[in-house]
């Protein structure tokens, strides 16, 4: 299958030339594994609430079994459609090809907004792990300035190039895993298997439990938005998704196994940052400091991966005429500067929301996007069975459709548990997208902005003209 992104032209900032994408170095397997890891996980930081909400047994079962219900199907669909359409834009291209460009735009709007909401968490979480050492970061003007400074620094790193982001992700991933491996060795003499079996079904906060699981196990499809930057995507993308899946499941289950088995259970203490307290109990202050540093730096990795995904998604939409041409322009480092600036602005505007509100709102919007993604996957399988698919899920069309049923049911459960406030905010965001698309088409007719199709569209619907 032809690498569609290789024939796209991009205007470099400050110049009138259109250098080929080939001039930019592509991402290989190992950096891509860690980019996916940070798109989805970033380590066990943030999973503590699952124990508080449901106890050890349900938390362990959740992070062991739910990946097979949700993560595996999503990763498989990403591998098939990402290699079928190896260009920037990812799921926007899939939905556009199956349902038409109007719904492709809606997919792009909801998933981009969900990603930006998600990214608003990471500067806040970064400071939450530092405020015990620097009390001034608890709130007020110092905290606001720190959030802005962190966002600016990480945005600049995203601007400097995807390969830099990938290299940083590898370093941060190794640094974040090592203290938990060490904690596991230290904890062996203190492990008590009976603690893993504690369960109280009458005392489960299902909303918190499901949102924690869903938030920590989704976004496998985000890597598809920069498929055009991947070296030999037909082989690299499926392989990287597989390795990342193993890494994510291990990165959640092992720390939970150690933490719940090595210390007495106090469910009310299991909240963000509790792994650092467990580390102090097991290994002393130095191990707690290491885990706090790993947690803080992990949030940097997740910010960088999400920013790359969000900005390249906007670039991919612009090459298909869904957004003004200026979103397709690249800097000298090969990065979509306008997309990065838009995504960073959204992060700053949304950073005032609370952690729980952010997680619930992004989950709600993400669910809508995933419903369209599943529909697009099934429709492409039924309508275009003979189309080239370098990687194809080995279940047949009927089996692949059946595979989509459990995650679809999970989506309905997550939506049902959303609060009224989150539903209202999310529905307003959906309505904005429904209105925004015709407004952009009107601006195109009035020639307020320049639109062009620079991608070699492998599409089954008419693109914007």
Image (spheres, rainbow, N blue to C red):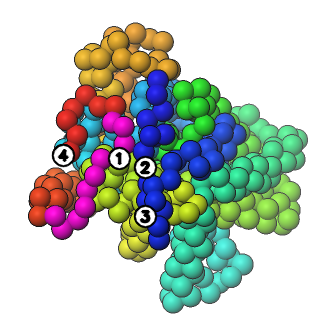
Task: For mark 2, give the secondary structure.
Answer: loop
Query: How many callouts does the rendering have?
Result: 4
Could you give the CA–CA distance between mark 4 and mark 1, rounded to whole angstroms? 12 Å
In the image, which disc is placed on residue 16?
A: 3
Which label sits on residue 9? 2
The one of 224 and 274 positioned closer to us in this rendering:
224
- Name the disc covering residue 454, or none: 1
Question: Which residue is pictured at 48% across the width and 33% down the height?
Answer: 3
* Label 1 SS: loop
Q: Is 32 in the magenta?
A: no
Distance (Cα) linking label 2 and label 3: 11 Å
Q: Residue at x 53, y 35 (%)?
A: 62
Residues in magenta, as a range: 447-457
Residue drawn at (77%, 38%) of the image: 192
State whether residue 70 appears in this view. Answer: no
Dot 2 alpha-carbon crowd within 10 angstroms: few under 14, some 14 to 19, many 20 or more: many
Locate residue 155: give its quadrant. bottom right
User: Disc 3 or disc 1, which is closer to the eye?
Assistant: 3
- Circle 4 sits on which residue? 465
Q: Is residue 155 toward the left or the right of residue 353 in the image?
A: right
Which residue is found at the position 28% from the left and 59% from the top? 324
Decide: few, some or many residues near mark 3? Use Cα within 10 Å; few <14, some 14-19, many ≥20.
Answer: few
In the rendered image, residue 444, in percent from the top left (x then y), is placed at: 17, 59
For mark 4, give the secondary structure: loop
Q: In the drawing, what numbered circle is on residue 89?
A: none
Distance from disc 3 to disc 1, alpha carbons, whole Å, reads: 15 Å
Q: Where is residue 433 in the image (x, y as percent from the top left)?
A: 21, 55
| Coordinates of residue 396 in the picture (x, y in percent) | 40, 9
Give the number of the mark in front: 2 or 3: 3
């Amino acid at each position: 299958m032809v690498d569609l992104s290789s024939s796209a032209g991009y205007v470099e900032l400050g110049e009138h030339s259109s250098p080929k994408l080939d001039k930019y170095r592509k991402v290989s397997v190992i950096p891509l594994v860690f980019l996916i890891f940070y798109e989805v996980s970033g380590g066990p930081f943030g999973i503590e609430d699952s124990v508080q909400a449901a106890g050890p047994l349900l938390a362990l079962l959740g992070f062991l079994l739910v990946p097979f219900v949700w993560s595996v199907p999503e990763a498989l669909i990403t591998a098939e459609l990402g290699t079928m359409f190896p260009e920037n834009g990812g799921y926007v291209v899939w939905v556009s090809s199956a349902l038409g460009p109007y719904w492709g735009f809606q997919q792009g709007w909801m998933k981009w907004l969900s990603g930006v909401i998600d990214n608003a968490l990471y500067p806040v979480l970064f400071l939450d792990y530092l405020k015990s050492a620097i009390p001034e970061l608890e709130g007020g003007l110092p905290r606001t300035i720190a959030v802005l400074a962190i966002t600016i620094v990480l945005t600049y790193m995203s601007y400097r190039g995807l390969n830099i982001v990938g290299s940083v992700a590898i370093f941060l991933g190794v640094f974040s895993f090592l203290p938990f491996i060490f904690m596991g060795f230290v904890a062996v003499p203190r492990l008590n298997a009976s603690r893993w079996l504690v369960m109280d079904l009458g005392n489960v906060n299902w909303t918190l439990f499901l949102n924690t699981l869903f938030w920590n196990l989704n976004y496998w499809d985000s890597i598809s938005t920069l498929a055009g930057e991947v070296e030999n995507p037909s082989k690299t993308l499926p392989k990287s998704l597989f390795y990342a899946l193993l890494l994510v499941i291990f990165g959640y289950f092992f720390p939970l196994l150690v933490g719940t088995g090595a210390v007495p259970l106090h469910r009310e203490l299991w909240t963000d940052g509790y792994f650092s307290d467990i580390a102090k109990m097991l290994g002393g202050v130095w191990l707690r400091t290491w885990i706090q540093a790993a947690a803080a730096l992990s949030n940097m990795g997740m910010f960088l991966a999400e920013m790359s995904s969000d900005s390249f998604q906007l670039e991919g939409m612009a090459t298909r005429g869904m957004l003004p041409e200026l979103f397709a322009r690249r800097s000298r480092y090969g990065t979509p500067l306008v997309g990065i600036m838009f995504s960073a602005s959204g992060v700053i505007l949304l950073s005032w929301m609370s952690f729980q509100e952010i997680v619930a709102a992004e989950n709600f919007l993400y669910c809508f996007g995933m419903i369209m993604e599943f529909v697009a996957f099934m429709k492409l399988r039924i309508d275009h069975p003979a189309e080239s698919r370098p990687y194809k899920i080995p279940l047949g069309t009927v089996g692949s459709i059946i595979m989509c049923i459990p995650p679809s049911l999970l989506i309905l459960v997550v939506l049902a548990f959303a609060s009224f406030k989150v539903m209202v905010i999310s529905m307003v965001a959906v309505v904005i997208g429904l209105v925004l698309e015709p407004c952009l088409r009107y601006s195109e007719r009035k020639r307020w902005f320049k639109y062009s199709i620079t991608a070699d569209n492998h599409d089954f619907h008419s693109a914007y003209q």
